[in-house]
Image (spheres, coloured by chain):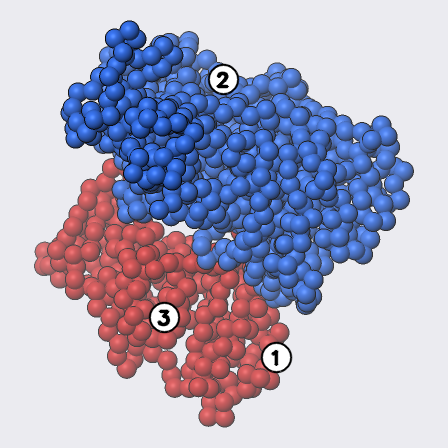
Chain colours: A blue, B red
Amino acid sequence: MTTRLFGEPVRRREDPRLLTGQGRYLDDLGSGAAAAAFVRSPHAHARVRDIDVTAALDVDGLIAIYTWEDLPERVGRPLPLLIPHPALTHGRTAHPLAKEVVRHVGEPVVMVVAADRYLAEDACALIEVDYEPLKPVVGVEDAVQGGHLVHEDVPGNIGARLVQEVPSAAGLGAEELIDSAPHTLSFRLDIERSAATPLEGRGVYARWDGSDLRVYSSTQTSTSVRMAVAAALGLPLTNVEVIAPDVGGGFGVKIVHPWPEEILVPWAAMLLGREIKWTEDRREHFVSSAHERGQVQHVRVGFDDEGRVLGLDVRILHDHGAYTPYGIIVPIVTSTQLLGPYKLGAYRVEFSSVYTNTVQVTPYRGAGRPQGVFCMERTMDKIARYLGKDRTDVRAANFIQPDEFPYDQRMTFQDGRPLIYDSGNYPEMLRLLKELIGWDDFEPAPNRGIGVGCYVEGTGVGPYEGGHVQVTSDGRVHVSTGLTSQGQGHQTVFAQIAATELGVPIERVSVVTGDTRRFGYAVGTFASRAAVMSGNAIALACRKVREKALRIAADALEANPADLEITDGVVHVVGDPTAAVPLSTVAVLSNPLRYAFDDEAAKATQFAGASSPDRPPVAEGDEPGLEGRDYYSPIRSTFAAGMHAAVVETDPLTAEIKVVRYAVVHDCGRLINPMIVEGQIHGGVAQGVGGALYERMVYDPHGQLVNASFMDFLMPYATEIPHIETGHLETPSPLNPLGIKGAGEAGVIPVSAVIASAIEDAEGIEIDRMPISPSELFDLRG
Amino acid sequence: MKPPPFEYHAPRDLGEALDILAGAGAGGKVLAGGQSLIPMLNMRIAAPDHLVDINRLGELSSIDAGPGGVTVGALARHAEVERAAPHPLMVQALRLVAHPVIRNRGTVVGSLVHADPSAELPAVLAVLDGSVRLARRADGPADGVVTRDVPAGAFFTGPMDSAAEPGELAVSAFFPALPPRTGTAFREVARRHGDYALAGVCAVVTLDEDLHISAARVGCVGVGPVPAVVDVTEACERRPAATVAWPRVAAAVRERAEPDGDVHASAAYRLHLVGVLAEQALKDAAREAAG
């Protein structure tokens, strides 16, 4: 029996539990806890003049009411700015509860704690906040006029401005090359806001026992929440533990930390000496978590007769909402990943990251890439249209070639490291895609169009992740890693890696993630990094365990470790299955304290050699137990890629838009589990279809989010998602031991670009704004 | 998203329900399927003092199809009516109502009383000239019940507003049967499968013995404060469907529509749609009428 599982489509081991209702999500915990609820601002911009809680004091079951003035200094100070950047000259973050001014609808103003959530909401409804409305700033183009300010001390509402320039090989700038190019085009593109909208919102549940604090949070990073909570509450790190239970989706919004509630709920639990839970409801999620995507882009491009881009100049207005807790990662990703699989003559990109009185913007699956890809792929289509060329030929003319890797794009990526693509094969990928969708045989017809889009995605950003692997005397393998899981299938893929590295059946491997009691150092699950980072760390930890297991088994079997292998959980001499010792026994032998608590320990005594009276039972440099810990820290990101194509039909009368075929060719290096990668792609494409055709955050001129419910924010159902055809290409990453690249965000990235391309082809109308609804297509038809 | 406090009542028969409703007056709200009311309570859009749960009133769950039409009791669920298939247009409409789990719980009469102008069933009642039966406690010491039948044209009084008065319970709705050689159809455009329609049209077409259109009516969804019923018999000029001047018919329907724009669609698009859908639904209905 083989134990090689890496690369196999192993079924998701977590699914039977999750699909039969046995998941333990945040709200499934702490049934006896008191409930927190928040009074949130109904105004986009206002000064808080007075808060009157008198009427709420009569609510039975009320436990406490807190405003900003009640918070100690450590708790009430502005939330941390997680990722500073020199270009972010005017970074601003919110206070956990509003201090004097509210800057978006939904900003928390008062926290109420009551016996249950019903009573807490009753009390909230009776609290009267006197607001002095201020002029709201809505829409990024209005915001940069600077007529009204979101923050009084931020002129022009500009939080950051960054210019990045990559001259041509001959040292010429983009503007110069565009001006002298045979052909030029300039246009404006517009991408609207959407959001991650996981089915489970945020949530925090805190328990204080007088000395230790335990916090459960529906988060994408339990280790960093732990550090944030300890710092805000002035507790030693060792007295705080944070656990991410089952998490019902994150998609980026839960990597932001600490959320106000992650500080306030534990603080109140300590102060009141009782368990407190806050479970975010859907309306709260819409108005008080985070959004993404909104950008306006002005593009100028110069190109030759073949469609080769000689110079590209992009100016981006990025709407980051009211605060910048996550820095300017999103526009940095847009401006760098915009380059895709192409080598341009020269490139200049300038972005302004702009404050508006709307919910803050932080990364949502794709994290700025969908906007960048929309920009570049619209550009490619416009060049093809202008030259009368096939759209795929124009792309191919600009591709980086397979023999040009590693390819240096001469920019700085989001991790602060050089933007160097490690590997890829873009011409082959395009060939596979064209074959899959039948590009060359596509027959044009009225109201039927085909579209294409390409992207490159930097994945597996550092700085590190770790893995711990322990084999216990029952032969079980316990894997833990600090990053969290929110549906990715880590119980399966990490177990596949461990089972393959150690030569054990997967049934014997268990995986724990996101629990600071088990693993204290981690970064988190975001940026398509978990498989690359923790996957490699776990593999390295397994290799340490394997080496030790072979050493111990070699002693027991009087063999050379180099002659041993592990198959099906048994260490044996190659070619001699009788000279064997099970890993369970090796685990017993690894610990000189050998009480015979169980049969395995009793059996192991036959292997116990006579210990030398001249040496300590645990040799110098050795440790008891069969376990290993290791970390993986990459020098830079590894670059995955994908190309999508779609066939779209539009109704000539009703202007309804139907995606009739959708094809994906994807390269994330070596596949750990092709089925899980396909699932990631399917989910990503589904979110992409949402972003292209259905989802938008509609703010009115007063800064009210007018569609803040699943009635009016149209997340697509399964009925709206086309069948997705996938093909894989595997160009291993040379950067990490397993040769893998990230796949988590992939599917969503090019979808708006692809569908715009197909609608344009079907309608003959240029599509420069996404998402697009039937009503808007009707308007465009004129 | 938790409702404000209310008193919950679970009457066991109609008389008890009417007593409670009479006592509650304007502060009373009836809970049947709850598919609209519960979200409104949770969002604190609705804040009744008394919630009167009629789900134990088994006497209200009947679906009676007679020669004159179908009487649907206040507790008949969408899915039950869909399965019983007592009326072709009701079945065509119910297939467009939300999703199976909502249809399993939601009630036909509840949808009528909720009076959402984007909902399918009010338009069906309106195009068929049906009616809603409202019951209340008789004044005075006797425990009598007074009922009144309100025709659809008078029942829908505005968006989310009906003729049901405080203290009244809608106990049933009556959907008249179709005359001979009559076909029906329902067409709508919704953003997602099962969503409220951006615009929708149900059509009832009757043919004469020569298969010329002798009567044609449409009920329009989502293009005004209440379901708009337009009689297009005249515009069809007693022609067979194949020779009707459909643009004229569509124009006649559009003339009666007064849609608003919202986050999902502009008013102009809805106006365009209602004409397109009217033509499609009328053609479908005529085809069905011809058998």
Q: Which mark is residue B160?
A: none
Q: Name the residue beneath numbered marker 1.
A: B245
- Measured as percent of width and height from the top left, residue A762 is found at 67, 61
Q: Is residue B264 above or below residue A162?
A: below
Q: Secondary structure at mark 1?
A: loop
Q: Name the residue beneath numbered marker 2.
A: A80
Q: Dividing the picture into quarters, in which one does residue A402 lie? A: top right
Dot 1 or dot 3, earlier in sequence = 3
Amino acid type, callout 1: Ala
Q: Quadrant of the C terminus of chain A?
A: bottom right
- Residue density around tag 3, few if under 14, some if 14–19, many if 20 or more, within 10 Å: many
C-alpha distance separating marks 1 and 3: 28 Å
Please name which of the two marks, 2 or 1, marks the residue nearer to the observer: 2
- Measured as percent of width and height from the top left, residue B124 is found at 40, 68
Q: Secondary structure at mark 2?
A: loop
Residue B261 appears in the picture as rendered: no
Q: Name the residue beneath numbered marker 3.
A: B90
